[in-house]
Amino acid sequence: MTIDDGDAARHKAKMEKRKAVQDAEVAGKTLEKGLLIVNTGPGKGKSTAAFGLILRALGHGWRIGVVQFIKGAWSTGERKALDAFGDQVSWHSMGEGFTWETQDKARDIAAATRAFEKARELMADESIRLLVLDELNIALRYDYLPLAEVVAILQARRPDLHIVVTGRNAKPELIEAADLVTEMTLVKHHFAAGVKAQEGIEF
């Protein structure tokens, strides 16, 4: 592609204006705080995005906590990879599988309660900078935990703690309390074409 002098000059002027606007916007942001982040929606990638954030935080030397509310002791690629970081990652898979597998609400409530107790323990550990509560939205959707109490506890986190909550169907109360909410939209999924869950992609 050939760019003439006029195009180059117009592009440069446009980018200079864009840079000035961007620099002014960045300069206006002065707050620093622990964020409550919610990854929700019907699309794939909610937990995957949380694990990507874990990787970024590990690169800065942070200590990380993970509590999985639904998934049990699966052998997943992310857990195998994060095991290499030793005590820098405190990982707890405390679910008993998906609700359609257990078919026992009392058992699911007990598992979710234990998982949230572990989450509170990790929230109190001042060495942990980022805490991922994987599939907490599912536990809240099925009323395995008291919503108002959970939201209040997450809101009362210490000022420097970042928390990521994943799972479909985030409750409006949690969305309202969050600092950042991303909804993964399903456009197309390979399951619909008969492709099974694959190592390295789904787990």
Image: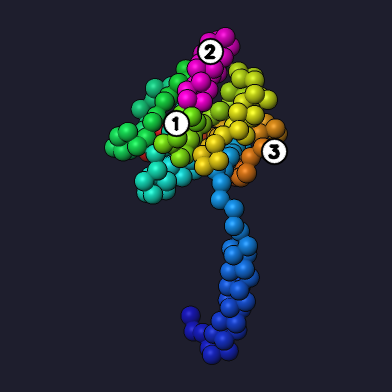
Mark sitting earlier along the chain (2/1): 2
Per the model, the C-alpha gap separating discs 2 and 1 is: 23 Å
Q: Are marks 1 and 3 in contact (CB under 8 Å)?
A: no
Tell which tag, 2 or 1, sits nearer the viewer: 1
Is residue 13 at least partly visible in the picture? Answer: yes
Q: Which mark is residue 110?
A: 2
Q: Which mark is residue 125?
A: 1
From the image, tell me which residue sits under label 3.
176
Tell which tag, 1 or 3, sits nearer the viewer: 1
Amino acid at pointer 3: Glu
Q: Secondary structure at mark 2?
A: helix
Is residue 189 at least partly visible in the picture? Answer: no
Q: Position of 83 compared to 154: left or right? A: left
The answer to which of 83 and 123 lies nearer the viewer is 123
Most common SS among magenta residues: helix
Q: How many marks?
A: 3
Residue lying at 41% horizontally and 36% vertically, measured from the top left: 127
Asked whether 105 falls inside the magenta stretch, the response is yes
Residue extending farthest to the bottom is 5
Which stretch did the figure color magenta? Answer: 97-121
Mark sitting earlier along the chain (1/3): 1
Per the model, the C-alpha gap separating discs 3 and 2 is: 27 Å
Mark sitting earlier along the chain (3/2): 2
Per the model, the C-alpha gap separating discs 1 and 3 is: 26 Å
Residue lying at 54% horizontally and 17% vertically, measured from the top left: 113
Residue 167: quadrant of the picture: top right
Q: Secondary structure at mark 3?
A: helix
